Every structure is written in C-alpha cells, then in structure tokens.
Image (cartoon, rainbow, N blue to C red):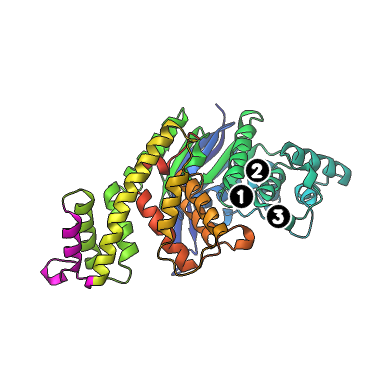
Amino acid sequence: METIIRLENLNLYYDKGKPSEVWALKNVNLKIEKGEYVAFFGPSGCGKTSLLYTIGGIDIDKITGGSVVVNDRNIREFSNQELAIYRQMGIGIVFQQFNLIPSISALDNVALPMAFLGISSSRRREEALALLGRLGIENLADRYPHELSGGQQQRVGIARALANNPPIIVADEPLGNLDSENANKVLEFLKELNEKDGRTVIMVTHEAWSLRDVGRIFYMKDGEIVKVDEPKTRLMTAKSVSSYLYRELYPELGVSETSAVILANLFLRGYSVDEMKRFEFFLLRRMAGEMDGEAFKVNLDKPFREGGVGLWRQKAEKIARSVEEMIERKKEIEDVCEELERNPATPLYDEVKKIGDWLIEDYAGIVSDIQKIRLEEIISERIQNVISAEHFKRILNLSKGKFGLGLSLRATERISEKLEAILVGNGGLSIKLSQ
C-alpha cells in the first residue's frame, strides 16, 4: 500500500520553557496508508487531538522535533502559502464543536472554503447543495446554525470539510455533541467516505463504541502511542479495547481496585490519602466476599488508630448502606449486560427505572416527570454505551430548554459518579460495539 502520512520522531510542546510547559507528543512514529480508516484512541489529555491537529497543519509551529510527511512532503518545511493551500485542499477537518459561522447560512458555511480557491459563486452554490444533499439536509440550506439541531450542524460541518474534495478527512471527537441517532449517522457516513470514496479517514475519540468500523487503532497514553492494533471484526475490536482499558491504560489497577478507587473518591472527599487507602482495603474485601456487610460497617466506624477508617457512626452507616446497594445494583447490571449480549434490543424499562430512582433518591431538588423520563432515556443509553460518561454528565447539566435535565454541577457529579461506580468492571458496557 501507498503511505500517505508518515510521522517520524515527532515531539510537540505547549508553553515550551514556561512553568506551564506540557510535553504533548513524545517521539511519535507512525505510518498511515492511503485509503485507511484509523483512529487515535485514549483518555482526555493523552495527546490525540494534538496529533490530529499536527497532521491537519494547525499546530506546526509548536513542533520542536521530528517530521510530518504527507504525500512525501514534510509539511514542517512548507511556506505559509503552501501550508494554507494544504489546509484548504489537502485535508478536511470535522470539529467536535462544529465551528460554523453563526451569521451565514448552512449553504454559505459549506461554500466558504471554495471561495478561497476563487471558484465562482454559482459553482460554489451548486457544489455546496450537492454536498448537503449527500448528507440528507439540502432542505436546510438556507437555515442559520442556531436554527439547526446538533446532528444537523455536524452534518453541515462534514459537508464543509468535503468542500474542496480533500483526500484526507480528520475528525476530532465528531460524536461528542450528538445524541445516539445522529452519532450513528455520522459513523455511517465516515465509513462511507472511506469505503465508497476511498478517502483516508482519521478519527480522534475517547468513546470506545465509535471504533466499530476502523481498520487500525492507535492507542495513546501521556503523549505516546503505546499500542497499535488491527482488529478484523467488531468483536475483535471490543476485545482489543477491553485489553487496553483494563490492562494497559492503568496496568497498576485491576477492575476491582479501579472500582474501589472510584468509590473512595465518591464517599471520602476531603479525607486524607491514608484514610482513603484504608477504605479501599476494606471495600475490596467486601466486594470479594471476604467480609460481610456488618463487619464492613464496623471497620468504617472503628477509629483509625485501631485499624479502622475512623468515620463517625452516622456516616459509616450511610456509606455501608450505599455500598450494599451498589453491590446489589452491580449484580443487576451484570445480568442486563448478559441479556444485551444475547439480544441488544431487549427493553430495559424496569431495570432502568430502578436505577433512575436510586440515582436521585438523595437529590434535594424536585424532579419532574419529564425530567425522570429524560433521565431514564440517558441511563439506558449509558448502560448500552451509546453515550459516554462525559456525554451523560453533559445532558444532566444541560438546561431543560435544550432537552437536558437542568441539574446543578454538584448534583450532576454525584449522580454520574454513582452510576459510573456500578458500571466499573462490566467491560461489555464500556466497549459495546455490536449494536
């Protein structure tokens, strides 16, 4: 195959030489072949977006070493004019935040990149309408961005990225602001661009399920590529992601240990590291069945100097009760997971309602029936990993006028952490790729 992108010993810093200096990319070496569909996958802050923007010619001035070779030319050596042409014609970028110009119509947003190449206004309009038509939104051509839904804005953004027919499409967290239906539409279109158009597609994502169609995955951690995999099926992709999440991203922690850390941070905010570690020790024993619920509660209440955690009795009882509920809910979710494996379309109404009631039982505010329905919708989507944990939180906090729940940041954090704590350990939830 023909190599279209080659990175050699690439290093990139932000705020080089300042106290806030960040080494964002560390000696990165990789090759991407023409016509591939690849993804950079990893947690927030791992360097994947920096890598994408470097390939897109955006962060070139921050590179301190190495080369970025595209079609056998090192774009670090481009003049400003050559770099501008490369950004206009060599590559198309799909942004998470859409980045549409609010004062012009959808049609004009798509046509704008063509204007920079001197294409006539009539041809720009014709080409832009054709692109909007391909994405099924030509009827929205005259609407302004604020008159479009998030999914519609993202499709306009994709059409704009295609405006000058670039051979390479890069997508930066393209599903981050979309509901499940529109997210699936975007994934299908990226797949189409790769398979039918033969374009090279590069996606940055932290959502495991969005990797379902990619041919190669570059796993990233702390600015480095720590693993490269080429899964041949969606099942192989799921296994690959599971291995990365639970063995390579945090090799020092097992699944139970990870759950214990999350719960310690949830219940013991403001406590010392030693107290949290002591709590994790007893929690792991409780989760493993080596200690019953009553003994667990006693050890939470026992003074620290006597080998306990040292919580006051009322707090110890409340936490012990919550842990018992979480252990029970975890079993329910494991059962749900098994059922999803057998039949992904299985209704989850009863289970989701129970979980929803439990998540808001300590919420001091009033939750309307409409909010409860919306909460149950997003719990169901989160269980099946249609949406990420971050997306779940965003909907909790989003105003009711924008179809969120309108909860405070504090309530959002508490509810989200409660749900995530019982999802930890269910690898199938984290990597649901077969739907």
Residue at mark 3 to residue at mark 2: CA–CA distance: 17 Å
Q: Please identify the quarter of the rendering in which residue 413 is found.
A: bottom left
Q: For numbered disc 2, what is the local secondary structure?
A: strand
Badge 2: residue crowd in 10 Å (few <14, some 14–19, many ≥20): many
Q: Are marks 2 and 1 in contact (CB under 8 Å)?
A: yes
Comes first in the chain, label 2 or label 1:
1
Q: For numbered disc 1, what is the local secondary structure?
A: loop
Q: Nearer the viewer, residue 356 or 94?
A: 356
**Residue 300, magenta (yes or no):** yes
Badge 1: residue crowd in 10 Å (few <14, some 14–19, many ≥20): some
Q: Nearer the viewer, residue 352 or 391?
A: 352
Report the side of 254 relative to 235 (left or right): left
Q: Please identify the quarter of the rendering in which residue 245 is found.
A: top left
Res 100 label: 3
Q: Is residue 273 visible?
A: no
Q: Which residue is mark 2?
A: 91
Residue 309 spot, x, y in % from top left: 19, 67
Badge 1 amino acid = Gly
Q: Nearer the viewer, residue 178 or 110?
A: 178
At a point 35% along the width and 42% down the height, the residue shown is: 334
Report the side of 83 relative to 329 (left or right): right
Residue at mark 2 to residue at mark 1: CA–CA distance: 9 Å
Res 57 label: 1
Q: Nearer the viewer, mark 2 or mark 1?
A: 2
Badge 3: residue crowd in 10 Å (few <14, some 14–19, many ≥20): many
Instruction: Identify the magenta region.
Output: 291-313
Badge 2 amino acid = Ile
Report the side of 71 relative to 67 (left or right): right
Residue 158 spot, x, y in % from top left: 67, 44
Comes first in the chain, label 3 or label 2:
2
Badge 3 amino acid = Leu
Residue at mark 1 to residue at mark 3: CA–CA distance: 20 Å
